[in-house]
């Protein structure tokens, strides 16, 4: 039983599947001494190297899975290294030995609020995947009059440059009727670039402030200050892994099966030899 190369590497915490696919495309990864290509699958006995360094792989049930909630301030970019020297969301995260933090999605430089980071790249991939339908909720301060017609348009769907986008809900969140700025709570399951801002802009409304306050069932803790993080407990992580069907059942997956055979002293079954005289 083989698994996709990027999936196996994601479990090691080297990065998300998307990052690792870019590494493969750039020729940074080899399998058994041969430069890997996108679409390669690996077996338990294969030797995987990244930049020439052998990477020890793990069964899913042996993965050290950590998840933290981070309160992103404005002015930080969602990148490990910024060519312009701006602060990044990784600057304030706890240091790791032998692992890397993988961010779950992005927020633009002016957006604040809840971000998730994990040491499990496969978990990050599944949390970001649209098929799992995690709802993102934002508090939005808007300049302009949000009429019933504009509200209905954003709920029904608006054609943006990269496809149709819509809000799942729009709720009034305070502000005087005559005030130039008014707060709303909006939710959506998409994850397109600057999607919330572009939806309001499509209705000639300007977003003055944007704060992500919820991802799935996780809400931004009221006592978590900007630039600080909080680690989730195992009980808090479990609903996330259950939701994306990442349960780490014993002796499942590529390396779990191989380990079980080793513990029993079994050898992998041989393929039947083909009779050269039989058609």
Image: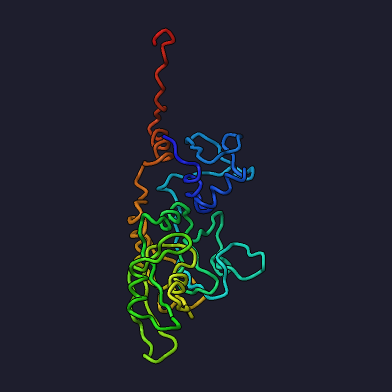
Residue 254 % position (x, y)? 42, 39
Q: How many marks?
A: 0
Check the image and report above or below for 97 versus 273: below
The residue that appears at 60% across and 37% down in the rendered structure is 35
The residue positioned 43% from the left and 44% from the top of the image is: 59
Indicate the quadrant where residue 87 lies: bottom right
Quadrant in the picture for residue 223:
bottom left
> Which quadrant, please, contains the C terminus?
top left
State how the image is colored: rainbow
Please state the horizontal and vertical placement of residue 108, each as a whole percent of the image.
52, 69
What residue appears at the point 50 percent right and 49 percent down from the top-left corner? 12
| Quadrant in the picture for the N terminus | top left
Is residue 267 or residue 140 the one in the foreground?
140
Q: Considering only vertical position in the picture, is 178 above or below 233?
A: below
User: Furthest residue to the right?
Assistant: 84
Q: Residue at x 47, y 60 (%)?
A: 162
Pick the residue in front: 183 or 180. 180
In screen coordinates, is 128 left or right of 23? left
Residues 237 and 25: in front is 25
Image position, residue 56 (x, y; %): 53, 44
Residue 269 in the image: x percent, y percent? 39, 25
Is 181 above or below relative to 153?
below
């Amino acid at each position: 039983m083989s698994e996709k190369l990027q999936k196996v590497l994601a479990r090691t915490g080297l990065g998300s599947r998307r990052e690792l696919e870019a590494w493969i495309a750039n020729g940074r990864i080899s399998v058994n001494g041969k430069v890997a290509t996108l679409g390669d699958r690996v077996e338990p006995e294969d030797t995987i190297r990244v930049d020439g360094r052998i990477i020890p792989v793990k069964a899913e049930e042996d993965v050290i899975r950590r998840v933290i909630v981070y309160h992103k301030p404005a002015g930080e970019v969602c990148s490990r290294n910024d060519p312009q020297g701006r602060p990044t969301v990784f600057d304030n995260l706890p240091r790791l030995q032998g692992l890397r933090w993988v961010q779950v999605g992005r927020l633009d430089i002016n957006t604040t609020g809840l971000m998730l980071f994990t040491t499990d790249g496969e978990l990050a991939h599944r949390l970001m995947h649209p098929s799992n339908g995690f709802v993102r909720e934002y508090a939005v301060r808007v300049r302009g009059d949000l009429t019933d017609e504009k509200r209905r348009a954003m709920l029904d769907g608006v054609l943006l440059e990269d496809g149709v986008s819509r809000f799942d809900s729009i709720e009034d969140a305070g502000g005087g009727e005559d005030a130039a700025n008014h707060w709303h709570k909006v939710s959506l399951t998409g994850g397109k670039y600057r999607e919330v801002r572009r939806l309001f802009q499509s209705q000639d409304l300007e977003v003055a402030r944007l704060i992500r306050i919820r991802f799935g069932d996780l809400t931004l803790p009221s006592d978590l200050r900007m630039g600080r993080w909080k680690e989730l407990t195992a009980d808090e992580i479990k609903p996330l892994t259950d939701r994306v069907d990442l349960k780490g059942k014993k002796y499942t997956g590529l390396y779990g099966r191989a380990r079980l055979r080793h513990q029993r002293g079994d050898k992998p079954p041989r393929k039947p030899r083909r009779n050269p005289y039989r058609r």
